[in-house]
Amino acid sequence: MPKPVVLITGANGEIGRALLRRLHDEGHYRVVTVDLTPLPEKHRPYCLETYAGNIMDRYLLDQIAAHHEIEVVFHLAALLSTRGERDPELAHQVNVEGTLHLLRVATNQSGRLGRAVRFVFPSSIAVYGLPTLEEKARVGRIEEEEWNLPITMYGCNKLYCEQLGRYFTLHYRQLGALATAARLDFRALRFPGLISAETVPTGGTSDFGPEMLHAAARGDRYTCFVGPDAKIPFMAMPDAIDSLLGVLEAERATLRHTVYNVGAFSASAREIADRVARSFPAAQVEYVPDPVRAKIVDSWPEDVDDTRAREDWGWRPAYDLERAFTEYLVPSIAKRYEGAPRG
């Protein structure tokens, strides 16, 4: 019996490439990818098929579904928060309309297969919005239904898409003859800031942590776009991939919700800088907060309460701040810049 097929959108992103390697190493699925840009040649042996195209292209998505019996979707393609603030209309088109196209395709596929396609969706702490730093400090760890008042288009998009996924899972085709048709099985994770040792940060709003580390490894001075006390939760990329696969493999009957917080450790910009300096003593950091990006970070929670994920499907992060630096980040990033010109 052939292995089930997984579709990964946004496969060229930092999550996508890490997930692609893990799925290849574990060997339980055949993988089909789609991204705006062609997948690099070195990653193509991991895949059954690769497509270069836009998730706004309904014809392309329908053709992919027609050629492959897709049983799992990892919908990673998105326009992130900083760029989304520069072009909110484009962010809505990509993040909402693109997601709706994928939900439609996966729902139709569920009907053809006669069983629910599992649709795994990375959401974000951007769905939260704290009004002041005082309130942020007061509330501490936040549960899923608290402070769902995002201040960015990206956060609004993610929050709405969570509700779309819930609708397609619980309520779509609830009337008449269509009521018995197989529905989607949507599962969303609200990620904190992600830190990868494999990819260079690309300007995301939570990237002040990884940017600081990469600059120190290169011997460059880093200008931090948030203040030293700015604090949000973070997660090492291997834990992010573990969480995606963990929620994917969980039995539907054990999942009481469609959306889950996942967390690992929380740190301020100053705490990260201090930890970076332990590994790279010559590191230089200055704080010049950008009014827009700093305001966004300040609206996100200091930490998230991931009790539901721990109880429903056994979520446990492997990396705290110290282990993330010692065992994962510093060895790989230091090696990346060995022999490179300094400063």
Image (cartoon, grey):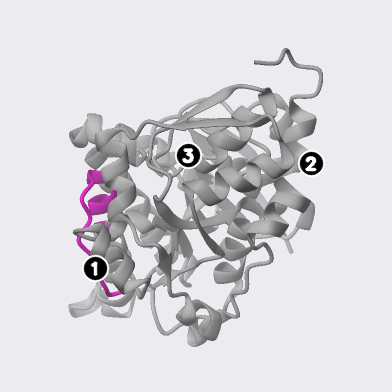
Cα–Cα span, label 3 and label 1: 23 Å
Residue 331 tag number: 2
Is 312 magenta? The answer is no
Cα–Cα span, label 1 and label 2: 38 Å
The residue under label 1 is 147
Residue 208 tag number: 3
Pointer 3 local density, CA inside 10 Å: few below 14, some 14–19, many at least 20: many
Q: Position of residue 38 (x, y in %)?
A: 56, 25
For badge 2, the amino acid type reads: Pro
Q: Quadrant of residue 85?
A: top left
Who is closer to the viewer here, 43 or 30? 43
The correct choice, above or below, for 287 with respect to 272 in the image is: above
Q: Secondary structure at mark 1?
A: loop
Who is closer to the viewer here, 217 or 189? 217
For badge 1, the amino acid type reads: Trp
Magenta stretch, residue numbers: 145-160
Q: Nearer the viewer, mark 3 or mark 1?
A: 3
Q: Secondary structure at mark 2?
A: helix
The N terminus: image quadrant? bottom right
For badge 3, the amino acid type reads: Phe
Q: Secondary structure at mark 3?
A: helix
